[in-house]
Image (cartoon, grey):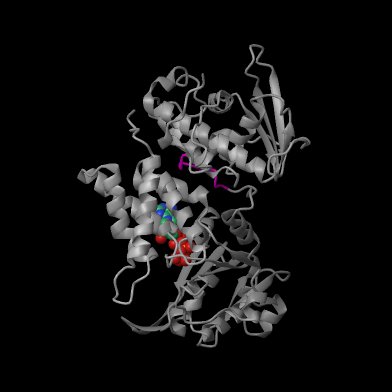
Amino acid sequence: MREEIPLALHCPLDPQSSTRTYGPGLGYAVYTLLRGWVTVRASGAQLSVSYPSSSASKAAREVCASGDRWGGDLSSSSATPHLAVVSALLGSPHFPHSRNALKRFVTQVEQHTSERWPYTQVLGGLTNAPEVKQALLGLSDALYFEIKAAGASGAVQDGGQVGALPDLPLGPLIEDLLGRGAAQAAGPVRGLGLEARLRRLMRRGGAALLRGPKGTFKTSTAKRAALAEGAALSVVCGAPGMEDVDLIGGLYPGDTGLVWRDGPVTRAIAAAQDGPSVLLVDEALRFHAEHFNRFVTLLDRYSADEARAMGVPDALLPDEAARYQLLTLPTGDVLAAPAERLTVIFTTNAGDEYIQTSSGFDAAMLSRIDLVIEVLEADLQVLLPLLDQAGGDPRLTTVAVSLMQWTQAELAEPGCLLCSHLDARKALSFLREARENLSYGLDLRGALLDACTHVVLGVICPLDSAGRLDAGACAAVMNELQALIDQLGEWHPAG
Ligand SMILES: Nc1ncnc2c1ncn2[C@@H]1O[C@H](COP(=O)(O)OP(=O)(O)OP(=O)(O)O)[C@@H](O)[C@H]1O
Ligand SMILES: [Mg+2]
């Protein structure tokens, strides 16, 4: 009989499905990957995975995928698991829970060895260690339900075929999974996620607008992409009282009289003379609309001849064929940046919940922005490891993700009592507080309920006419949280 997976290890997908068992084919795929027996070839959206069959012959098998079409030898019970495990490692958007569970598992494995991937010595018999076994059961559960979900959404299909592809070294990807990665280095950027898209934009220069609710990783993704590209980063955060000097720079008293100090926009232009440069205009709608003119003119591009005619010195125009973005300083000087080295990223919230200074971007501004991206939800690939880190216990991560999803679903219902959803930033604070409560001696239930009372309710429940938190909304949240904690069962991680 197959080993049952305890409630506390269930990933938040498909919560109705209560009896869940370990999948040996999934475990075998994890084993071959970590043992170093898997060869992955990939290019763009094409993927091929070779691995030894689980039969006594250990005959080589190959399974392949092209985009969202999965195919090859799907008759083998280990084919889909291998594609799924590798997709999780590669950061496929279909497998965020599996990726996080794989990270937990490999982290547990490394607690028992000084080996680094491939783990040739340590894996045999390791599942006798309770934490390793639990991490494997959790990984099996996440893989099973994400394969199921991907299949249901049409992402897994039979019949894909791929041609000759270059080998993908797995060592750097495992390092990246564990957060030690140098896999960020130059080379093509895979994937269609937000960070990959921004990194590609940074390689050609341009502008992007990231618009969405609070806490969906707009600001942090823009910064991470800039760092990954080795770009210089200048940040300016919108605020109603801002003046031109806060953007461009100005004259300030110094030892020898007034001295010019660059503002973030000037710094970004200057940095683009040496290499890629990113200007992050955070909370853009908190600027007064008049500042947008500054950005509208900054986003226009000029030929070297045009720039020279406008007063840009030759030293700033190294390439006659290049296009340049210009900035006129109050002194009358005109600076230039090669357009392919300068990326401007605007972020903003949108919707009635936010008190902004400006009502929106005008058409002239939007037409100059290359990527206009709605970032409606926090990317689970980013969020799950952060929640693990904040709470220090996978069970807390499951509760937080489930509560986030519940608040989203509630808000979509007519007559909802809540005024806002539980966003990623709040979810992280919630788990940090719960963790403190646990270390203070509260049990899991007490720690979560107390943290929710002090961190979450004040943000997602409205105030009544007397200025107190709406009792009905608070009760609904606490009831849901109680139910989520009940679903964790009585199991303890030390097993
Ligand atoms: N690498 C990280 N390590 C720790 N915390 C992080 C990391 N990345 C993001 N966070 C947390 O997630 C929160 C939300 O991310 P971020 O500020 O990027 O969201 P946002 O979409 O810009 O939100 P807003 O619209 O409110 O400005 C951050 O405040 C931070 O607490
Ligand atoms: Mg932000």
Q: Is residue 23 left or right of residue 305?
A: left
Q: Does the rendering let one see residue 106?
A: no
Residue at x 66% of width, y 68% of height: 370
Q: Where residue 422 sits in the image (x, y, percent)?
A: 42, 59
- In reply to whether residue 425 is colored magenta, the answer given is no
Q: Nearer the viewer, residue 292 or 455?
A: 455
Q: Nearer the viewer, residue 450 or 358?
A: 450
Residue at x 63% of width, y 42% of height: 150
Q: With respect to residue 247, does 346 lie above or below?
A: above
Q: With respect to residue 280, does 286 lie above or below?
A: below
Residue at x 61% of width, y 38% of height: 148
Farthest residue, direction top: 56
Q: Is residue 144 left or right of residue 321?
A: left
Q: Nearer the viewer, residue 472 or 309?
A: 472
Q: Where residue 290 sits in the image (x, y, percent)?
A: 53, 86
Image-quadrant location for residue 82: top right
Quadrant the C terminus occupies? top left
Q: Where residue 29 sits in the image (x, y, percent)?
A: 58, 27
Residue at x 52% of width, y 40% of height: 99
Q: Does the rendering let one see residue 297?
A: yes
Q: Main secondary structure of the magenta part?
A: loop
Q: Where residue 181 sits in the image (x, y, percent)?
A: 49, 42
Q: Nearer the viewer, residue 369 or 355?
A: 355
Q: With respect to residue 271, does 225 lie above or below?
A: above
Farthest residue, direction left: 440
- Tally the numbered discs: 0
Q: With respect to residue 309, does 219 lie above or below?
A: above
Residue span colored magenta: 178-185
Task: Give ligand 1's quarter of the image.
Answer: bottom left
